[in-house]
Structures are given as structure tokens and as C-alpha cells.
Amino acid sequence: MESPYRAMARTAVEACGITNIRVIRQAYRLVVRLLGVTGDMPLAIQARTVPSIVLISALANKAIKDGPTLEYVAGYGRGSTDFLKLFLEQKGDASKEKAEDSTPAAWKVLLSKLGINSSDEFEELVVAFVRDGRHDAKAIEAVIQGYRHNEKCTESRSLAHEFFERFNWGVTDCDDDLVADAVKLIARVADLDAYTVTALGKQMADLPGGTKLEDDLIDGWLAHFATIVDKSEFGESPFQQPLNPKLKAAIDHARDARIHSVTVVDAIKYLLENDSWGHREEAAMRASTIDDFETAMRTLKGRDFKLFVLKSLDILEKNQMYENRFGQAGMNFLEACRRIVRVEKENRFGRLLRTLFAESEVPMLLAEDGIEAQS
């Protein structure tokens, strides 16, 4: 059967200068294994994935003389120094190679010939596979499906990288042509991430009429950002990339709003499900009040009520450990229980709380203010 990747793989093999038939066949088999034989993979997605697979396979077989390291390929264009250090630390003693700040120009030439503008999780997963034999099929499939579902975004990112290349290397090109390319990218700004937009804006600012170009780019991205309901994917870059101040302010504001939208019920649920917490949960617990705990206990039903009360009691029992993170949350839960027990002395609600405290590690706390724990 004629593979849909054959033409793309052949071009990559030629760019890498591979002549060993065994290496070529192995690289081709890896392409088919990782991408599958579907026959409907868009060319833009093939161009994004096949060259990387061929290159990584060839490097693993040491078929490219003085070629880049696998770490370099996995971290290419990713704010690479910090990424490479992290990548190497994850490998432990499996790799003795060092991440160098300076790299041979030939490595960049090779990746440029292959059309590899920057790496992401895909290259990371392929490197893990050829090095350690860990074929995380679901993770690779998820990345590829992301490319397919966001084909327009993939094309826009490719155009952005072409703009970077032309701006940096097309030093004799007419500025008017670059301005025209900039205008096209501004129309596609919704497809780009904030860090790419920041970098593009800095370059556009150096063109004729650059101030307006950069403003239009930034304002366009902010207008798109305002329409996004779920902003949870927007956070700090793990590679410490710079952000335009306007974009950073918008993202920080959205993150703060997201943090403060979490309730004490949400936070307790997260703690139960993950046995850990993040900034949002910590902020919610610190901001929680006595009223919040009382309202939650009077509103929740069944298993949700049971788990909420038991986890809150656990936090109170370990208050010294949690206080630095959760502030007065444990004591606010205690006071909410005291309120309820005062009002619900004779019913099952009050009896349940008195029994729970009597069997807990802090039985005397509920007994304050004249309330006696039931043994």
C-alpha cells in the first residue's frame, strides 16, 4: 500500500543526507507507527510531524555525522536552555550529554532545511520513544489530534515563523512586503499564543508604521482573549518567555478572577480528589468565612455533605500543619459547627456533629462556649 507519508518522508531523508537503507526504512517505519496509515492526514500536519520523526530516528541511529543532540531537537525554540536542563534532569544518568548555551550553526541549518521552526510536546514524546522505548500512544495521538482540530492555528503559526525568518534573514527584502505580511498575521492573531504575539509585535514595531501595526496586533489578541470563556489554559510560560505588558496584565487579571471564583466547596472537593491543592484552592480556603462553611453544610446533601464535613474536620485536626496555607479555614469550620449545634441541639444534624467531634482528635474544641461533645 502506498503510504501517504512517503513523499514527505523522502524529502526529510534527503534534507538529513541519509543514505543508509536500513536507517531510512527504520525512520519510515517509525513515521507509520506513530502517525498511523490513515490516508487523510492534511499536508500541513504531515509537514509538522514527519520531518521531526525522521530526524529523531536518524539521530538515535547516529546516522547524521555531527548532528544535533536529541535534547537540542526536543527543546528547539522553546526558550531552550531552561527546557534542556529540565529535560536532562528528568533523564537522570541515562544521558551524559550537556545542554550548551552555544550550538553549532550547522544544527540550525539542518532544522531550517527540514522546516522545523520550533519543537513542542510532540518532539519530546518522540525522543522519549526512541531513547527509552516509551511509546505513549495516547499522548502522541492527543497531540496530533490537537494539530488536526486546530489546523488553521497550525497554519497561522507556520506563517508567523515564516515572518520571523523573513524579518531576521530577508535583510534585502522590501519593507512594504513585510508590512503586507504583518497585516495578514494581524488578521490571524486569534490563532496565535500570547508569547508569539509578543515576539511578533516587537518585530513589527521596527517596520514603517510599526507602532500602529503592533497596537493592532496586541489589541486584536486582547479582543479575542475577552471572548474566551474558559481561560484556564492561559498561565505562565514554563520557558520564561517575555510577555507584552498589556497581554500580561490581561492574563494575570483572568487568573486572579479564576482564583477568586473558586468556593470553599470547590476547594475541599479538589483536596479530596487530588490529595493536594494549587494556588486557587489555597486562595479559596484563606478567603473562606464561617458563613461559607455553615452554608455549605446546610446546602450539601448525601455523600457530598459527608465528605465535605469529614475533610473539613481533618483540616481542623491538623490545623497547625494547614494554617500556614489555609489561614483560619479550620477554625472557621469549627465555629460554623458550633453555630449549627447551638441551633440544632435536639435533631440529627446536631447529634451528628457532636458525635463526630467526640470521636475526633479534637473532642474538646466543640465543647467550648458551654457545648458538650457527645461520647
Image: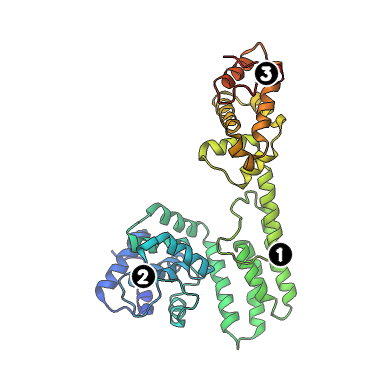
Amino acid bearing label 1: Pro
Tag shown at residue 54 = 2
User: From the viewer's perspective, is the residue at label 1 or at label 3 nearer?
Assistant: 3
Q: Residues within 10 Å of mark 2 (few under 14, many from 20)?
A: many
User: With 271 as the anchor, is 228 left or right in this view?
Assistant: right
Q: Secondary structure at mark 1?
A: helix
Residue that carries the numbered disc 1 in the rendered image: 245
Numbered circles on residues, count: 3
Q: Position of residue 195 (x, y in %)?
A: 61, 65
Residue that carries the numbered disc 3 in the rendered image: 341
Give the residue drawn at x 57%, y 17%: 355
Give the vertical position of 343 relative to 274 (above or below): above
**Given the current orientation, which residue lies at the most extreme left position?**
22
As measured in the structure, the alpha-carbon distance from the residue carrying label 2 to the one carrying label 1 is 39 Å
Tell me, yes or no, if residue 70 can be seen here: yes
First in sequence: mark 2 vs mark 1: 2
User: From the viewer's perspective, is the residue at label 3 or at label 2 nearer?
Assistant: 3
Q: Secondary structure at mark 2?
A: helix
> Of residues 83 and 21, which is closer to you in this image?
83
Amino acid bearing label 3: Val
Q: Position of residue 19 (x, y in %)?
A: 29, 79
Give the vertical position of 311 relative to 172 (above or below): above
First in sequence: mark 3 vs mark 2: 2
